[in-house]
Amino acid sequence: MTKNYTRDYWEGVLSGLKLEGRHFIDGAYRASSSGATFTRSRPMDGRPGAEMARGNAADVDAAVAAARAAFESGVWRRKQPLEKKKIMLKWAELIRDHGEELAMLETLDVGKPVMASLTVDVRLCADGIQFYGEMIDKMYDEIAPTGPNARALVRKVPLGVVGAITPWNYPMIIDAWKLGPAIAAGNSVVLKPAEQSSLSAIRLAELALEAGLPAGVFNVVTGYGEETGKPLALHMDVDMIAFTGSTEVGKLIMGYAAQSNVKRVALELGGKSPLVVFGDADLDAAASAAAWGCFYNSGETCHASTRLIVQRSIQEKLIAKIEAVTRSDIVLKHPLDPSAQIGALIEEEHMNKVLGMIAAGEKEGARRAFGAERVLSETGGYYVSPGVFVDMTNDMSLARQEIFGPVLAAIPFDTEEEALKIANDTIYGLAGAVFTKDMDRAHRFSESIHAGTVWINTYDMSNFATPFGGFKQSGFGRDRSVHAIDKYCDYKTIWQQFG
């Protein structure tokens, strides 16, 4: 039976919640070696949040040592594939069983509506762990062609210790994108979640242990990037860093890998994704896609459709439809309100950055159509309403910079060639979309957009069968799909000669 979720129900869940903020290393909770902690304000109301362990290089050393010991012992990687599969499937089941608790932890940390945390983030986290668990007993080695007197076995082997550094916008989902394939491949992992969003990661580690994942295979170190993320990326006993976050920090990660042990790096970075609408498009569908594609999760999405490239003749009509969709469907409320579709931004500093970028855009000549203002300030939280700026050019800051807020930049065009030039005129290449009823143009255009994912007449549709990642300064390497496992493995050739 479907539960009748109410604000009071979620307040009850919150009141009974255990907030664990210590590291999780070698199967146990552990305070920071220095004893230091930190707290941050809750995005929904500005009140103090949980007390978290403030990690440092010594804590990273301890986590890496535990991960290395677990890997070298073979306690996980040498298990029978079917046994490993059962453990990961049990882990996914436990995530679902504890869905309300995990959803509330996520909402406390990041300010998104708790119903979205439950129905989207928890669900996709569990689905991701299950997807890669199901793959464990379906990964085959190869026999290479040789002459009759030799046999060459080509084996796919785990790298060893993987450091995963994940962002605050979709913590559980992106954690699963890293943890699932890395652990399924036989590696041990040290996860450094964003300092803004560590609660769910710690709980995921505890549930993994409960499911039967051996101690040391999955470790969590909390803290600030300079104090924990940097030592992890520089660590000489870490074989790979898988990072999702800003392009600026991604470049630092590459440098740390080069400065240390030339460790592998996989980067999923920023975006400024174009959504191109031609005059013959279904404008209702385009308006809905543009609004949800940009404003979902309060715009804190790396592939958000923040650039609306629209044929000049339909711009006014399309903007009116986007406003109608936004006002009727994309409800901004307190995150514990079950009717909320979007909630708070991650923190006050980020809210001020978004508002500052809006103000700078207006000074450059961007014209506000609606929204993009601070709201619900009486709650103490950090809320900005969805908004659109029109009649822009692609050289304006709102069209160039990743704002990571609910702000859509509408840029008009006249010809297909002009639209394509604008779409590709960006340092990023994460995603894009084209809306048109002309399928020849749709396929021609989608092939020409330089991005890792391109949608036709829809936006943000995907599943675990499809790889996700970017071109250009949106990074390299792919999350999701069977292809994600490849980056956590290497190929070993074993040649046997006869006679």
Image: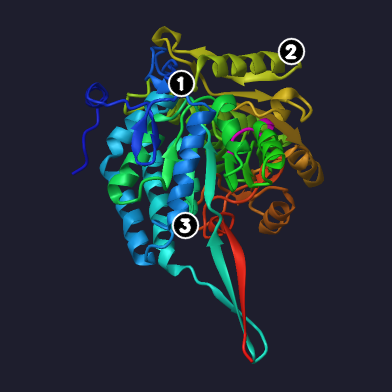
Left or right placement of residue 293 versus residue 209 in this view = right
- Classed neighbour count for the residue bearing mark 1: other residues with Cα under 10 Å, few (<14), some (14–19), many (≥20): few
Three-letter code for the amino acid on which mark 3 is drawn: Gly
State the image quarter where residue 134 is shown. Answer: bottom left
Front disc: 3 or 2: 3
Q: What secondary structure is found at the residue carrying circle 1?
A: loop
Pinpoint residue 215: horizontal percent, then vertical percent.
Answer: 36, 46
Front disc: 2 or 1: 1
Residue at the spot 69% in from the left edge and 40% down from the top edge: 254
Give the CA distance from mark 2 to mark 1: 47 Å
Left or right placement of residue 260 versus residue 85 in this view = right
Residue at the spot 77% in from the left edge and 30% down from the top edge: 394
Three-letter code for the amino acid on which mark 1 is drawn: Ser
Q: What secondary structure is found at the residue carrying circle 3?
A: loop
Give the total number of marks visible in the rendering. Answer: 3
Q: On the image, numbered disc 2 is attached to which residue? A: 363
Q: On the image, numbered disc 1 is attached to which residue? A: 34
Lower position in the chain sequence, tag 2 or tag 1: 1
Residue at the spot 29% in from the left edge and 33% down from the top edge: 101
Q: Which residues are magenta?
A: 244-248
Give the CA distance from mark 3 to mark 2: 53 Å
* Magenta span includes 246: yes
Three-letter code for the amino acid on which mark 2 is drawn: Lys
Front disc: 1 or 3: 1
